[in-house]
Amino acid sequence: MDVVPRLQMGLIDYMTSLYREGYLDDQFKQLQLLADESSPDFVKEVVTLFFQDSEKLIANLAKALEQPEVDFNQVSNHAHQFKGSSSSIGANRVKNQCVHFRAYCEEKNRDA
C-alpha cells in the first residue's frame, strides 16, 4: 500500500476517534467548513490562536489558585473564558471540564 493513502486513512481514523471519544464535537466540523481556497489555513490559524490563548488562561488560573486567599469568582471567570474559547473551536472535553470547574468554584463561593 502506498504511504500517502495509508497516512490519509490514519488521519481519518484519528479524527473519528477524537469525535467518538468526545474530544471534539460538531463545532469543529463547522470550523472546518469555513476553510476555503481564500483561507486554506483557517482551521490551523484558529486552533493555533486557541492554544496561545489557552496557555494564558491556564497561567491565569494557576496564578489565581496560588493566592493565599483564593478568589473563586476570579477563578470562575477564567474558567468561563476557557470554556467559551474551547466551545468555539469544538474542544468538547475541555469545555466540559471548564463547566465542572466553574460549578466547583460556585460551590466554594457559597461555602465562604
Image (cartoon, rainbow, N blue to C red):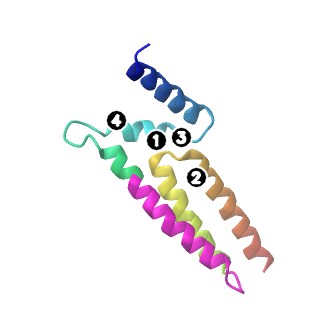
Q: Which residues are magenta?
A: 48-70
- Quarter of the picture containing the N terminus is top left
- Work out which residue is located at the far top of the displayed protein and give it: 1
Is residue 57 inside the magenta stretch?
Answer: yes
Residue at position x 44%, y 56% from top?
50
Q: Residues within 10 Å of mark 2 (few under 14, many from 20)?
A: many
Amino acid type at circle 2 is Lys
Position of residue 15 relative to residue 65, above or below, is: above
Q: Quadrant of residue 2?
A: top left
Q: Secondary structure at mark 1?
A: helix
Pinpoint residue 55: horizontal percent, then vertical percent: 50, 65
Q: Are marks 1 and 4 in contact (CB under 8 Å)?
A: no
Question: For the residues carrying marks 3 and 1, which lies nearer the camera in this image?
Answer: 3
Pinpoint residue 7: horizontal percent, then vertical percent: 44, 26
> Which numbered disc flags the more N-terminal residue, 4 or 2?
4
Pinpoint residue 16: horizontal percent, then vertical percent: 54, 29
Query: Dot 3 corresponds to which residue?
Result: 24
Query: Dot 4 corresponds to which residue?
Result: 33
Position of residue 40 relative to residue 53, above or below, is: above
> Which numbered disc flags the more N-terminal residue, 3 or 4?
3
- Residue 7 numbered mark, or none: none
Q: Residues within 10 Å of mark 4 (few under 14, many from 20)?
A: few
Using the image as rendered, state which of residue 107 and residue 19 is in the foreground.
19
Query: Dot 2 corresponds to which residue?
Result: 95
